[in-house]
């Protein structure tokens, strides 16, 4: 009998796809409904940040790297300043370490809740999306009250933090945290008990522990597969070693496990912030760092998506001669080769979303009336509105 | 393993290294030539074992350097293996992606941006540069020829 070779169909997801916030392309080879191979293409939005960084001065780079990602805009500069502080052997003021911890954990809460909302949206469960967006808002308000910005906080300097937490803010932060915790408890219980979510997420997109090690994944992607690594614990920075908290890891490796890890981490983050706010030491929030001597340093921070790693080399001048930044998605995304193959096509979007992939974000906005071409809100107007809102939040503290 | 045991374990590959440094606590730098990079990397990933973090390609002084960053999570130690590629005009090194899939992307990236050839890489397509970018122009080199 003559055999006919039939090419397997390829289904492209991306570069522009309604379920994705950013540009990336996954080419799924399918046999019927089952995915048999996946090819990934990134870099539709490469901005050459490592190259730009080498043309900036050391103290300008934190603002640049905070723009690598709008969501992880505390983690990237944190890893960078820690690398430079390692070269210059900087002793940080205690208060700075605590403020860094608080901002980093607030970022973790809003990022995990954002992921939960998107995950709900991906499986067609938009109630979760609405809840998540609503309960994330007070966290962003708190970040705005501390740093002046909802995202892109720009709060990190080599040798400390730009903005301090004012004492007037602390009582309100504590009551807000109680409120946020109550809402999160409700949300977490609703999500983890929901039979629809169980049916859609359990046993889906399993990444085994062996594959997690082979692909060297980090963050909730690793901890959801039973690899209990967490830079905050393993190579403690900021004030994490002085606070009581635990690393959340579960062994199953499916999308549900990754969701559980993130939800537990939200509760741990609230616990960390509450302790840090109560123990906040008195004193300055920055120290003056003059020269960066020749040398090389590595800095890392546990971003919501996993370990953010920065390597900096200095030749004693005022600019880094080499600066390498690695975002956690760079190692998490290739693990789709292990977690997506063998899946049903319908489960692939949530499996792709399960590592919370982040390529680049942050857009600028102007509002224009289409009929008259009149600019209703320009940059300065938005800046003014934004400042007024920050003042408003702080006044209510 | 504690830090001391890790140091002892790492000293098993001493013969293949130029030198070892520990400039600050919990940060170890190993130096080797490109020829021994494959076997040292294999030792670090499979036998110590360490977690691969990323690699950094550097256009150094008349040579290329590749820093392979590893993490030993039990003690939070960062182990950096620095491999020197002395032939600047024709930089080549053995790929570690055949046993370490996590290194596949970063080797493609270094190939794009610095023009380093990775021998035996399973899939050496472009990762960062677009398809219509001219051949032989490497944007992260010190001297970019147009």
Image: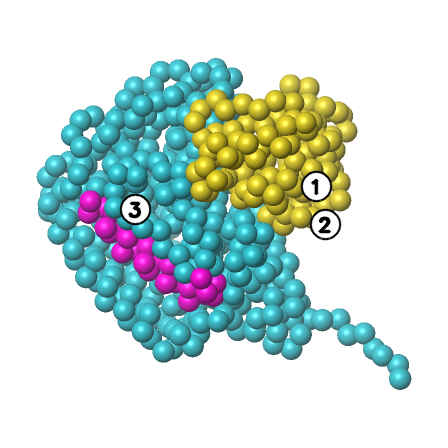
**Which of the colour schemes (rainbow, by chain, secondary structure, one colour) is used?**
by chain
**Extreme residue in the right direction:** A1
**Extreme residue in the bottom direction:** A1
Residue A229's place in the image compared with A371, above or below, is above
* Residue at the disc numbered 2: B122
Q: Are marks 1 and 3 on the same chain?
A: no
Residue drawn at the location 77% of the way across and 29% of the way down: B90
* Residue at the disc numbered 1: B95
Q: How many marks?
A: 3
Q: Nearer the viewer, residue A397 or A242?
A: A242
Secondary structure category for the residue under label 2: loop
Q: Colour of chain A?
A: cyan
* Quadrant hosting residue A1: bottom right
Secondary structure category for the residue under label 1: loop
- Binning the other alpha carbons within 10 Å of mark 1 as few (below 14), some (14 to 19) or many (20 upward) gives many
Q: Nearer the viewer, residue A242 or A124?
A: A242
Assess whether residue A67 is covered by the magenta stretch: no
Q: Nearer the viewer, residue A225 or A363?
A: A225
Extent of the magenta region:
A251-275
Q: Nearer the viewer, residue A248 or A122?
A: A248
* Quadrant hosting residue A233: top left
- For the question of whether residue A318 can be seen, the reply is yes
Residue A100 appears left or right of B37: left
Label 3 marks a residue whose chain is A
Residue drawn at the location 45% of the way across and 57% of the way down: A226
* Chain for colour yellow: B
Is most of the magenta stretch helix, strand or loop? helix
**Residue A105, numbered circle:** 3
| CB within 8 Å, label 2 to label 1 | yes
């Amino acid at each position: 009998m003559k055999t006919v070779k039939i090419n397997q169909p390829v289904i492209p997801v991306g570069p522009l796809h309604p379920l994705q916030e950013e540009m990336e392309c996954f080419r799924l080879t399918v046999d019927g409904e089952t995915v048999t191979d996946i090819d990934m293409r990134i870099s539709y939005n490469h901005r050459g940040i490592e190259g730009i960084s080498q043309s900036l001065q050391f103290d300008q780079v934190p603002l640049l790297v905070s723009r690598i990602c709008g969501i992880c805009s505390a983690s990237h500069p944190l890893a960078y300043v820690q690398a430079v502080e390692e070269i210059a052997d900087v002793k940080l003021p205690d208060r700075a370490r605590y403020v860094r911890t608080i901002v980093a954990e607030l970022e973790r809460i809003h990022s995990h809740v954002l992921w939960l909302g998107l995950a709900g949206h991906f499986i067609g469960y938009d109630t979760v999306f609405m809840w998540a967006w609503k309960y994330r808002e007070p966290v962003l308000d708190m970040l705005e009250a501390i740093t002046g910005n909802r995202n892109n906080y720009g709060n990190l300097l080599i040798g400390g933090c730009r903005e301090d937490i004012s004492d007037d803010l602390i009582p309100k932060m504590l009551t807000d945290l109680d409120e946020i915790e109550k809402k999160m408890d409700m949300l977490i219980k609703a999500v983890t008990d929901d039979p629809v979510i169980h049916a859609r997420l359990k046993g889906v997109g399993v990444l085994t522990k062996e594959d997690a090690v082979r692909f060297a994944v980090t963050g909730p992607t690793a901890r959801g597969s039973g690899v209990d690594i967490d830079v905050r614990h393993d190579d403690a920075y900021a004030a994490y070693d002085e606070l009581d908290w635990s690393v959340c890891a579960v062994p199953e490796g499916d999308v549900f496990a990754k969701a559980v890890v993130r939800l537990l981490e939200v509760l741990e983050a609230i616990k960390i912030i509450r302790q840090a706010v109560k123990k906040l030491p008195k004193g300055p929030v920055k120290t003056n760092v003059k020269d960066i001597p020749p040398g090389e340093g590595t800095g890392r921070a546990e971003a919501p998506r996993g370990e953010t790693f920065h390597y900096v080399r200095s030749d004693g001048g005022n600019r880094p001669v080499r600066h390498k930044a690695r975002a956690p998605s760079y190692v998490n995304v290739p693990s789709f080769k292990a977690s997506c193959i063998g899946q049903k096509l319908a489960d692939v979007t949530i499996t792709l979303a399960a590592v919370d992939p982040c390529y680049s974000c942050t857009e600028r906005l102007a509002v224009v009336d289409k009929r008259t071409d009149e600019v209703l809100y320009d940059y300065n107007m938005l800046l003014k509105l934004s400042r007024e809102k920050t003042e408003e939040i702080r006044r209510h503290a | 393993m504690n830090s001391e045991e890790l140091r002892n374990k790492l000293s098993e590959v001493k013969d293949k290294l130029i030198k070892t440094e520990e400039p600050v606590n919990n940060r170890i730098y190993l130096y080797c030539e490109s020829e021994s990079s494959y076997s040292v990397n294999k030792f670090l990933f499979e036998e110590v074992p360490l977690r691969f973090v990323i690699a950094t390609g550097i256009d150094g002084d008349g040579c290329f350097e590749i820093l392979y960053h590893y993490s030993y999570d039990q003690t939070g130690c960062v182990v950096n293996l620095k491999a020197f590629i002395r032939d600047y005009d024709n930089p080549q090194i053995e790929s570690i992606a055949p046993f370490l899939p996590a290194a596949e992307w970063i080797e493609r990236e270094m190939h794009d941006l610095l023009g380093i050839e990775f021998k035996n890489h399973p899939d050496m397509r472009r990762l960062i540069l677009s398809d219509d970018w001219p051949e032989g122009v490497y944007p992260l080199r010190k001297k970019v020829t147009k």
